[in-house]
Image (cartoon, rainbow, N blue to C red):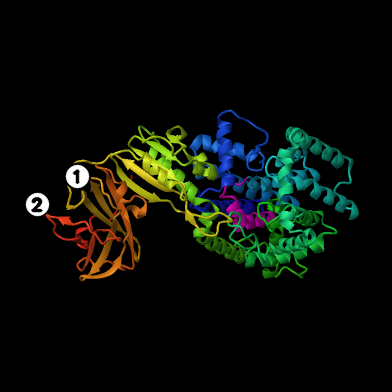
Amino acid sequence: MSRRSMLWGMVTVLLVAAALRLIAFGQIPPGLYHDEAYHGLDAVQILKGDLSLYFPANNGREPLFIYLVALTVGVLGKSPFALRLPSFFAGLLTIAATAAMGRALFSRRVGLLASAVLALTLWHVHLSRVGFRAVLLPLFIALAVWQAVRGIKGDKGTWHWVLAGIFYGLSFYTYTAARFTPVALLVFGVYVLATKQTVLNTRYTLRTLGLAALAALVAVVPLAVYTLLDPDIVLGRPGQVSFLNPAISGGDPWGTLWSHTLRTMGMFFVQGDRIWRHNVPWRPIFDPALGAAFVVGLAIALRRARRDVSAGFVLIWTAVMSLPTLLAEDAPHFLRAAGILPAVVILPALGLEQVGKWASGQVGKRIPPTPYSLLPTAYSLLLILALFATVGSYFYDYRAPEAGYWFEEGAVALAGRVNGFLGVGWDGERMVRGGPGDRTVYLDPALWEHWPAVQFLTAAPDAVTLSLEEEQADCPAAIFTWPFEGWRRAWALLPEPAEITFEEGPLSQGDRDPAPFPTYLAFFATPPDTTSPAIARFSGGVELLGVETWPVDIDRLRVRLRWRATAPLAEDYVVFLHYLRDGERIAQGDSQPVDERYPTTRWRTGDVINDDHHMDGVGQPLLERDALRFGFWQPENGEALYLLDEAGNPAGDWVEAPLKSLISNLQPQEQ
């Protein structure tokens, strides 16, 4: 393959890779897992001048990725997009570095094919779209190997060795699995000696290898000193997840090790990581097309390993860097296995090269190989199949509700709602450049402590009161509560009078929660419009200000009844709401007002209450035939609030309105 062909091939690969990694970036996968959010929290502290070589929170984390997050967050503001952006650039650089590494180890064609495999592999696509520091480890491995091989092959200048050492030393600042790389290098050294390879058989190579080791040592010394001073912080996490931990092995460590070994061996093309945060559950590293190429390439590498040091290196690196997942819980775990990238993609690249030779009739012939390009050959078809498999699986599966649960999408929605109400920061869709003004948010401390994403994304923390024990708030105010016990404390905070809107947050579900639950409950209080005329009045001091309807989905209708209290009510009334077609009831949505979150005995004089009800089974609305009927009744004694005429006399038990008269109100009013 010519240099020109490789150049244009790399342009194509990088463009496809960028598209796969940028489409709906920051939205797919949804949410922001707390591991990512902790990176953001530390990045904010960096921007305030609090620099560190290691970040102890959340079981301890290496610093390099966090400093990159500080850069993007400092420029773009606090949002999922900004936090994850370093992963996008790291992913693209890793693809380019893999091409360089593959070319140095084998050939231009293998380097190009390896970069194409990496670009299309769902595992790396996902790693490039989330804010996990593991994405940096493959990059620095590829850079270090690329420079080391160039030095071994006699490229002029010792700077290749210096760069190899620096890149290798910096890899320890990326992700914990880097601690296994010395083992891989040691095994590789034994292999070189055992097979009598000539790769290190000159004084020049040995001397420059020492130069690389010195450069690596200089780079890693600061982190090593920190580790010696605080070993519990840096070295505590591996013991927690080791298969030797009885909590993980269940008292059978060797049985656990055996099962982990089988699972790790199967992760390449049988069954992969089950955790949504790392992978589409159970999907192996390679799809069937690339899995077949992997098998062919593995056979080629095994056959060459005794005489080809490059093949031996790829096999040894892949095997040893699989140990971080093999020896820990949840094997196979694609974050802990990230160190096998980019070496592992060399194997399907070797297989694809072989398929191309078979398709071109170049195997077994004693004639010079004829040129053949990337696109017309058989391996192009396999790469196209891999592209469709990744696109179809990733952009479909990561829209599932389970993906939102695993990435704590509800917490991100909560932060966006807080920012949206305050008018500053990321509101869930865009950055708002404003300020809270006279608006105040009251947030249950349990929400703040439970969801690190809320802490990171909240743009105006000074306008947030982390308590529900304060006196009555000033209007406008928003009160966010934990969805379980204690949410009624919000009632005492509601300013009087106020227009009150209740909101139930999207669902969340932790790893060990038996069922999804609302992320939060919220009350929004804004100044009421005292000039709004009543369109109907009920006995007891209740006025109807309006009715709004809009479809939730194809078979569900949301109805908002806007009430105003002109006097306190002594009883808790139920709102009955019937959906009529040709005068016959086909659906209903009876409940206490505001989904039982703000009963009528809590209404204060002057309050405006936005009372939302959902009605299932309405089907497609028929405007000329459908109507709504609603009113108040007391289930215990059957007492109803009467509809009053203009003179104040009883005129019935309900209001009935044709649906066509409400069709102009198809959108909800946003607070």
Residue 532, numbered circle? 1
**Pointer 2 local density, CA inside 10 Å: few below 14, some 14–19, many at least 20:** few
Give the residue type at disc 1.
Answer: Ser
Please provide the residue range marked out in magenta: 108-132
Q: Is residue 180 left or right of residue 569?
A: right
Name the residue nearer the viewer: 229 or 500.
500
Give the residue type at disc 2.
Answer: Ala
Name the residue nearer the viewer: 436 or 248.
248
Q: Secondary structure at mark 2?
A: loop
Looking at the image, which residue sits at the far left? 647
Give yes or no for residue 110 being in the magenta stretch. yes
Q: Is residue 669 visible?
A: no
Give yes or no for residue 31 being in the magenta stretch. no
Specify which label sits upstream in the sequence, 2 or 1: 1
Residue 252's quadrant in the figure?
A: bottom right
The residue at which mark 2 appears reads as 647
